[in-house]
Image (cartoon, coloured by chain):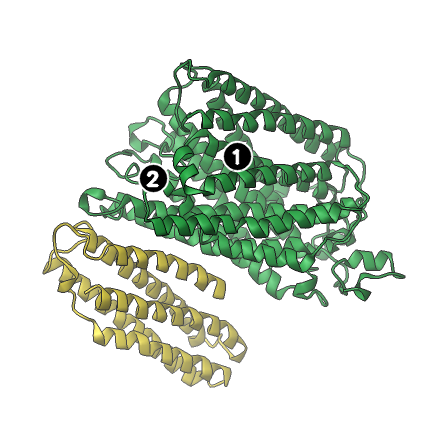
């Protein structure tokens, strides 16, 4: 999983470099100034790192109920983040007229944030699979290392968001 | 399942061919997957070779019209893409798959199903690339292959300049096979780090395993940027994005950077396994342990590190700052240091040894000489002013073919002959192997030595024809004649493999009197590899078993 994370990190590095390189290079259309900082959704995503940590802790102690609870909280927090991205994109497309074709800013913004959102989605699907297995009582103490590997991925997705957030909503604006 | 087939290997009734094939398709065994990688790569090697031959026939004399300019463009694109991604990489992965678990005394790779998945992704990538020949224009019904060059510079790849779907097939096939490569790399690293047999410390691993570990790390660092770049290209082509669209503020140079961030480490992804084969074959055929094992490992890892910081030496003519030029000149030249260390260590291994000139060793000796020459022209090209003069000329083509054919392919041929008895259980024909060696080395030098000259005389690469009277004619004729010898050599090679597989003498488990673990099990190895888990006390475990009075571990 560390190797996969290294490979994924390299992919994101390339896209982030592209984003940074193309800041201010758009010839026409909206600029990053139209972005609103999604504070609430960022807090949701980042705190989901804590909840999945709590879930793995609970599982390795054999506390299945607490594990299920924290896992569900993680999924809900991740889903809220995705919904937030959806609303943000709706606002950008409908009210500001920014699509992936509009200009360079649109291309880089949607690709970078979209790739991250895709990773969140993959993580959510994996978490949902674990919770379905857990619901049927198939996830026990012995599976803690496996769930820990999944939590590594989820932490990685959160760390990437810290970088993407800094680049897109901090430096980029 | 495995136990049954092991206890009754010869008495089973013959399995119908369909069942046999079915077992190959569903296999997760690292040896079978390794062989499948190798067969797959060999067939693409033949495709790529045919494309190269077509190009050379076209260039045999000025104003030749063997193929049209359009077809010529498709040929060099397909030749480059095929050879790098679907011949060289799968060959390297095939050998890594087959040998790494055997050499570290493991039963299989760490993730056997991921292994099978990676292979089929790579296979799908190659099929996608060649499907473009019939599907390039999709519904228009006219076939077309990618024709944008193997590095597919922007903005030529934009929708405007590459209509139809041929470029989409190119980018999708690289994206898909890239995921396969990353999967294999993850697998190799996990196998090496977690699956070693008792006593096999990192410092006792065979050099081949160390070098493949470095290779896998480089794949992760190098192929991922290519994947990201292909995603951007797809966004540009399908969603109307502007990453590489210069009219909307995008930059074509960014594609170059992203491609070469992949492209240069890729050379080392291919050449480091070649080093690995040579590091195993030379000691065995010199009857001496490898000279300077720790330094060899350090030099390999150093090459891996430096190689990710040299990519822009492909771009001196693009126009960078003088600081950028200086940095990439120096970092490129710095690679010569660890590489030189390795060459001296191989020479020192042979020094004073009792050298057996069998086919694997012959190929390794040729490797040493040719890799040195390729490195020297590499140092010439790494200096920016020289590069401005010769960039995109046939000198560059000759240089990198010297690396890829003269070094990598020669080492691969050596590896084929060295491990053929292990994989098939039979000896190859030494006479045919020597014929292959001499035909191929004559052809190689005719083609690629003389290819440097028209480059210095100003012949650019990728031209489909040229004017007579520029001093290029005779050189191009010689270059094309060399191709005939190489093709004959390949015929001898394939003939040898086929003949020996059916008619060769039984090899026994250890025909070379070698020292690494793969020779301690049967030839071909059973599905479970080792009957008992081996325990290792030195870098040459089989030496310890064969010479209990003078074991290696007393001296390490």
Q: Quadrant of residue B484?
A: top right
Q: Tag 1: Cα neighbours inside 10 Å, few (<14), some, or many (≥20)?
A: some
- Residue at which label 1 appears: B401
Q: Quadrant of residue B427?
A: top right
B293 lies left or right of B131: right
Depth check: A97 or A31 in front? A31
Residue B274 appears anywhere in the view: yes
Q: Tag 2: Cα neighbours inside 10 Å, few (<14), some, or many (≥20)?
A: some
Chain in green on the image: B
**Are the residues flagged by discs 2 and 1 from a single subunit?**
yes
Q: Check residue A168 in the rendering and tell me which mark sits there, or answer none.
A: none
Q: Position of residue A51 (x, y in %)?
A: 37, 80
- Residue at which label 2 appears: B153
Residue mark closest to the camera, 2 vs 1: 1
A38 lies left or right of B496: left
A89 lies left or right of B43: left
Depth check: B316 or A149 in front? B316
Residue B34 appears anywhere in the view: no
């Amino acid at each position: 999983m560390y190797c996969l994370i290294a490979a994924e990190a390299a992919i994101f590095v390339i896209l982030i470099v592209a984003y940074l390189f193309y800041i201010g290079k758009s010839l026409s259309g909206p600029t990053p100034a139209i972005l609103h900082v999604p504070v609430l959704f960022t807090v949701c995503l980042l705190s989901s790192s804590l909840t999945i940590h709590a879930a793995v802790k609970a599982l390795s102690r054999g506390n299945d109920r607490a594990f299920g609870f924290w896992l569900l909280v993680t999924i809900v927090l991740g889903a809220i983040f995705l919904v937030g991205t959806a609303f943000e994109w709706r606002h950008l497309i409908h009210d500001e007229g920014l699509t992936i074709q509009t200009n360079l800013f649109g291309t880089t913004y949607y690709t970078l944030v979209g790739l991250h959102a895709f990773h969140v989605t993959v993580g959510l699907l994996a978490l949902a699979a674990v919770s379905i297995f857990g619901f049927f009582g198939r996830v026990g103490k012995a599976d803690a290392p496996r769930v820990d590997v999944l939590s590594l991925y989820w932490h990685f997705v959160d760390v990437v968001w810290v970088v993407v957030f800094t680049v897109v909503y901090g430096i980029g604006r | 399942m495995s136990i049954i087939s092991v206890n009754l290997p010869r008495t089973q009734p013959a399995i119908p061919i369909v069942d046999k094939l079915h077992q190959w398709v569903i296999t997760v065994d690292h040896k079978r997957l390794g062989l499948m990688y190798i067969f797959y790569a060999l067939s693409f090697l033949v495709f790529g070779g045919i494309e190269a031959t077509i190009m050379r026939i076209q260039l045999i004399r000025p104003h030749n019209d063997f193929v049209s300019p359009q077809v010529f463009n498709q040929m060099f694109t397909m030749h480059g893409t095929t050879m790098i991604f679907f011949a060289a990489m799968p060959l390297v992965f095939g050998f890594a798959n087959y040998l790494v678990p055997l050499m570290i005394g493991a039963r299989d790779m760490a993730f056997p199903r991921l292994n099978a998945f990676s292979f089929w992704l790579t296979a799908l990538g190659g099929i996608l690339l060649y499907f473009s020949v019939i599907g390039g224009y999709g519904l228009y019904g006219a076939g077309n292959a990618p024709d944008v060059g193997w590095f597919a510079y922007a903005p030529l790849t934009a929708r405007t300049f590459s209509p139809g779907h041929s470029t989409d097939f190119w980018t999708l096939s690289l994206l898909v096979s890239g995921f396969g490569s990353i999967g294999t790399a993850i697998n190799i690293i996990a196998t090496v780090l977690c699956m070693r047999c008792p006593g096999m410390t990192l410092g006792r691993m065979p050099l081949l395993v160390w070098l493949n570990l470095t290779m896998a790390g480089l794949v992760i660092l190098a192929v991922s940027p290519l994947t990201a770049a292909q995603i951007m290209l797809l966004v540009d082509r399908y969603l109307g994005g502007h990453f590489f669209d210069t009219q909307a503020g995008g930059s074509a140079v960014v594609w170059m950077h992203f491609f070469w961030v992949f492209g240069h480490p890729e050379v080392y992804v291919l050449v480091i396994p070649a080093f690995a084969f040579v590091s195993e074959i030379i000691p065995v055929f010199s009857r001496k342990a490898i000279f300077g094992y720790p330094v060899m490992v350090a030099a390999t890892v150093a090459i891996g590190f430096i190689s990710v910081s040299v990519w822009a030496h492909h771009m001196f003519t693009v126009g960078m700052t003088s600081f950028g030029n200086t940095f990439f000149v120096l970092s490129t030249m710095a690679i010569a240091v660890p590489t030189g260390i390795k060459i001296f260590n191989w020479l020192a291994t042979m020094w004073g040894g009792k050298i057996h000139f069998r086919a694997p060793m012959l190929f390794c000796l040729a490797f040493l000489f040719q890799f040195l020459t390729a490195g020297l022209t590499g140092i010439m090209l790494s200096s920016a002013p020289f590069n401005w003069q010769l960039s995109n000329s046939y000198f560059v083509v000759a240089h990198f073919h010297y690396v890829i054919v003269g070094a990598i392919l020669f080492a691969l041929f050596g590896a084929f002959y060295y491990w053929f008895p292990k994989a098939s259980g039979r000896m190859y024909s030494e006479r045919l192997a020597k014929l292959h060696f001499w035909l191929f080395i004559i052809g190689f030098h005719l083609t690629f030595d003389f290819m440097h000259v028209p480059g210095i005389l100003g012949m650019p690469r990728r031209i489909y024809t040229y004017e007579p009277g520029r001093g290029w004619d005779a050189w191009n004729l010689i270059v094309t004649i060399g191709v005939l010898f190489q093709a004959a050599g390949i015929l001898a090679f394939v003939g040898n493999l086929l003949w020996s597989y059916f008619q060769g003498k039984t090899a026994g488990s250890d025909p070379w009197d070698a020292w690494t673990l793969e020779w301690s099990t049967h030839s071909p190895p059973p599905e479970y590899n080792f009957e008992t888990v081996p325990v290792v006390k030195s870098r040459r475990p089989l030496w310890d078993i064969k010479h209990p009075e003078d074991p290696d571990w007393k001296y390490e």
